Amino acid sequence: MNEECIHGLDGELCALCFPPAAPVAPTVPAARAPRASRARTPEAPTALRTIVAPITTGTARTKRHDDKVGEQRIYHLTHIRNLPGILATGRLLADTSADWTDRPVVDISSPENRSARRDVRVSGADSLAVADHVPFFLSPNALVWENIRAQSLDPRLSDDAHDAAAYDFVILVSTVKKVLDAQIDAAADPTASHFAVTDGDAAFTATRFGATAESADRMLQMLRADLDSDAILKAELLVPGEVPFGLITLIGVANDRVRDAVKPILATLSHKPKVAVYPPWFHPTEEL
């Protein structure tokens, strides 16, 4: 196997990242029964209130990129059966985008969760809704994803998500810098805010939003300052509207079989992200 190290987008093969993969059965095993005892009980979502981080003036592009915040990886989770649709449009689309022609084959969010995210506003009554954004995690061990891979009950997840095996998913990886650069290049005002950052699930009552360039930057710095905290496992980065697939630099998969399924899907594209087998991203935390 000749895969790229997960510790660096341009790294070399690493024995720690890529231990020998366990044999994979030729057929997908039946999903295990949900183990509610493992679930991280989420707070109840609300459409009535958000707590917005203090609004300040935007910061210049150089300031945003001089620190380590731009290097922060961001992770978008999707089912492998949704990948052809993403590639057909060339974009990751927000839930409420008018550009959808076909909805995802496997919808990860429960109807209740989608409804809550369509109602909650990012920075006030006249601002965009959470569902007007493409969501990213800030960790490959995000708590929602942990509840999928541990097959634990979570009201934010659809029945399809609960029934799927962890290795049926792929993780699309980019960085804060790539998304910010693309948004700045497309905007008339280079100091405007182009994404929001939260310190929790974006539909929850107590979640705070960094909704301007400076407050989003501060929120990212705060989350990165304590990587052992659960906060970064709950946090989201929200990109309004869409994210071009060309910003995806890496696709994380569970095993060689999934890698071999993904690579032909990418074959006709001019932009081909690296496909890396990294089993730790797909096993429940208890098993690592």
Image (tube, rainbow, N blue to C red):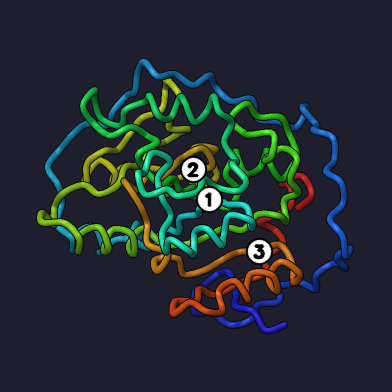
Q: Secondary structure at mark 1?
A: loop
Seen from the viewer's position, the closer of residues 177 and 24 is: 24
Q: Earlier in the sequence, mark 3 or mark 2?
A: 2
Q: Residue 24, position in %: x, y?
A: 85, 65
Residue at 40% x, 36% y: name it: 131
Above/below status of 144 relative to 77 = above
Q: Residue at x 25, y 64 (%)?
A: 66
> Disc 3 or disc 1, which is closer to the eye?
3
Q: Which residue is mark 3?
A: 253
Tell me the CA gap for discs 3 and 2.
Answer: 22 Å
Can you give x and y, in whole percent of width and height, for residue 109 in the image?
57, 36
Mark 1 Cα shell of 10 Å, populated few (<14), some (14-19), many (≥20): many
Residue at 44% across, 80% down: 270
Residue 144 image point, x, y percent: 60, 38
Give the residue furthest to the top: 48
Quickly name the residue at label 2: 232
Q: Amino acid at mark 3?
A: Val
User: Which label sits on residue 17?
Assistant: none
Residue that badge 1 annotates? 139
Three-letter amino acid code of the residue under disc 2: Ile
Q: On the picture, is 3 further left or further right than 137? A: right
* Sequence-wise first label, 2 or 1: 1
